Image (cartoon, rainbow, N blue to C red):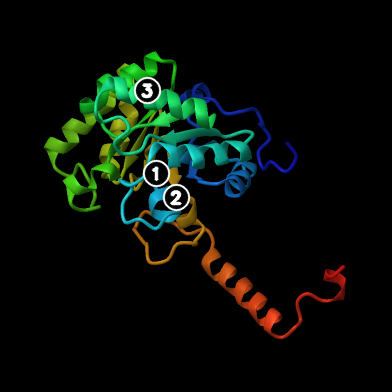
Amino acid sequence: MAGYLVSDTRKVTTHRFIEMKQRGEKISMLTSYDYTMAGIVDGAGIDGILVGDSASNVMAGNGTTLPMTVEQMIYHARSVVRGVNRALVVCDMPFGSYQIDRHEGVKNAIHIMKESGCDALKLEGGEEIIDTVKGILDAGIPVMGHLGLTPQSINKFGTYAVRAKDEAEAEKLRRDAVLLQEAGCFSIVLEKVPSNLAGEVSANLTIPTIGIGAGGNTDGQILVVTDMLGMTKGFSPRFLRRYADLNSVINNAIGQYVADVKACDFPNEQESY
Ligand code: KIV
């Protein structure tokens, strides 16, 4: 695995996630949706890659994650898996694929695992889906939970604002986190919740929490890769740190290519047969 930026090139497993929490090592995660990006992300030493249903927004241009289908998630996850050697690959179960009942959820979970080759699945929700989570775990599939701002419920929430600011919702989140851990989940994403609450929940669990917009006291962090690389424009939530301005880099490169073609400068003799 030449080119890896980390010395430990062993494949990351769900057990390694838990070990990282035990020794106080923060877990790094990013999303990816395709082979080329996943290879770059994996090569840079990321611990986990989420094939997020945010593909709906950043790959397909939809306003929400709701339109994603099981077959579309399989296509993205299979592409990512082909590009990854080391990172744990987790695939989102899309809206509608696990909310109906346990039987349907387990069936779709097995289908995604078989067809994509990913390592684990992520589902949004707590108590209301716990029976399905248990069924998927019983089938031998590792599950990552997702609490707080769960984008598949955006039409119920009505806004992408911070969740669990009031005590009733915070208390439900605490309960849901424990339920998911007791069911056997290996990790839980906490999205857009107050930092204090995320820290408290993380301290009370033995499984790692992965935060996005949840402050620095979770056991790991995740960002959407196209956002942190500055490819997407016009999305600037407070929690997003941009590590590059790839939108400008790509724009300038393509502008230069267009100019070279127009000026008959590309291709030159060395670039021709
Ligand atoms: O779909 C996604 O990208 C996610 C992350 C934001 C956690 O669920």
Q: What element does badge 3 sit on?
A: helix
Q: What element does badge 1 sit on?
A: loop
- First in sequence: mark 3 vs mark 2: 3
Residue in the foreground of this view, choosing between 46 and 220: 46
Quadrant (top left/top right/bottom left/bottom right) for the N terminus: top right
Q: Residue at x 34, y 58 (%)?
A: 238
What's the CA distance linking mark 3 and mark 2?
A: 28 Å
Residue in the foreground of this view, choosing between 236 and 263: 263
The spot of residue 167 in percent (x, y) is 13, 38
Q: Residue at x 58, y 49 (%)?
A: 37
Amino acid type at circle 2 is Val
Could you say which quadrant of the image residue 137 lies in?
top left
Q: Is mark 2 within 8 Å of ligand 1?
A: yes
Q: Residues within 10 Å of mark 2 (few under 14, many from 20)?
A: many
For disc 3, the marked residue is: 107
Q: Name, please, the residue furthest toward the top.
A: 138
The spot of residue 72 in percent (x, y) is 44, 42
Q: Name, please, the residue furthest toward the bottom.
A: 263
Residue in the foreground of this view, choosing between 256 and 188: 256
Amino acid type at circle 1 is Asp
Q: What element does badge 2 sit on?
A: loop
Mark in front: 1 vs 2: 1
